[in-house]
Amino acid sequence: MMFGELTERKQLERAMRDAGRLPPGQSATLKWPVLHEGTVPRFDPRTWDFQIAGLVEKPVRLTWDEFTSLPIKQVTADMHCVTRWSRFDVRWEGVPFAEVMKLAGAKPDAKYVMVVAEQGYTSNVPLEDLMRPATLFALKHNGEPLPADHGYPVRLVVPHLYAWKSVKWVRGLEFMAQDAPGFWEENGYNMYGDPFKEQRFNG
């Protein structure tokens, strides 16, 4: 790391800590580290779909054209990784979670959602967290399409939780009455993942 970059990062880190935006145990980064389980999947718009199942009024299957025809919004939010880096003021553009919810309609006993991605990857998130205004299915990052290794074509973004909950290569949702662990949760990660409470691991 060059001296100028190190100085800029340290200044950013100090400013974000003073503003209460840097969670404990985190360090600011100017880059976007690549971390994921498995390989980067290939995207074919002809076969890609997005499915909603479980405790919903209407199961849904959307093609790529149907999904990208849904309303789009922009969100600027911070991103905190469980591996202890934080990025600030990231600009996302995509489909709000609430717009997808309108298509399926959660049943009254639906309290949790299992987010399903390529290669069988899953992560659990409470429904009320997904319904926050900043939660969306990102198609763009800082004005450009998502890079393949960061979730192209669609990545769920849940800014107030650790970034493993912001599932890459997302393909669907399963609504549930009870909480259940996803991939990393089964491997010792916290069921919720609040960065400001340092909910990294269980136990």
Image: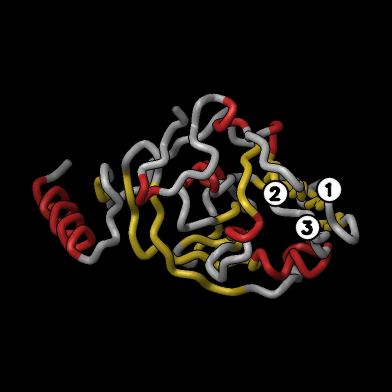
Query: Decide: marks 3, 1 in contact (CB < 8 A)?
Result: no
- Density class for disc 1 (Cα within 10 Å; few <14, some 14-19, many ≥20) is some
Q: Label 2 is placed on what type of residue? A: Val
Residue plotted at (69% across, 50% down):
112
Query: Decide: marks 1, 2 in contact (CB < 8 A)?
Result: yes
The residue carrying mark 1 is 54
Q: Nearer the viewer, mark 3 or mark 2?
A: 2
Decide: is 184 above or below 113.
Answer: above
- Image position, residue 86 (x, y; %): 33, 50
- Mark 3 and mark 2 lie on one chain; the one further toward the N terminus is 3
- Mark 3 and mark 1 lie on one chain; the one further toward the N terminus is 1
**Does 53 sit left or right of 114 as displayed?**
right
Quarter of the rendering containing residue 187: top right
Q: Label 1 is placed on what type of residue? A: Gly
Quarter of the rendering containing residue 157: bottom right
**Does 10 sit left or right of 173 as displayed?**
left
* Viewer-side residue, 201 vs 118: 201
Mark 3 lies on a secondary structure that is: helix
Residue plotted at (83% across, 59% down):
107
Task: Tell me the CA gap for discs 3 and 1.
Answer: 21 Å
The residue carrying mark 3 is 64
Q: Label 3 is placed on what type of residue? A: Trp
Name the quadrant of the N terminus: top left
Residue plotted at (65% across, 67% down):
95
Q: Residue 151 bears which disc, if any?
A: none
- Density class for disc 3 (Cα within 10 Å; few <14, some 14-19, many ≥20) is some
The residue carrying mark 2 is 113
Q: Is residue 42 visible?
A: no
Task: Tell me the CA gap for discs 3 and 2.
Answer: 21 Å
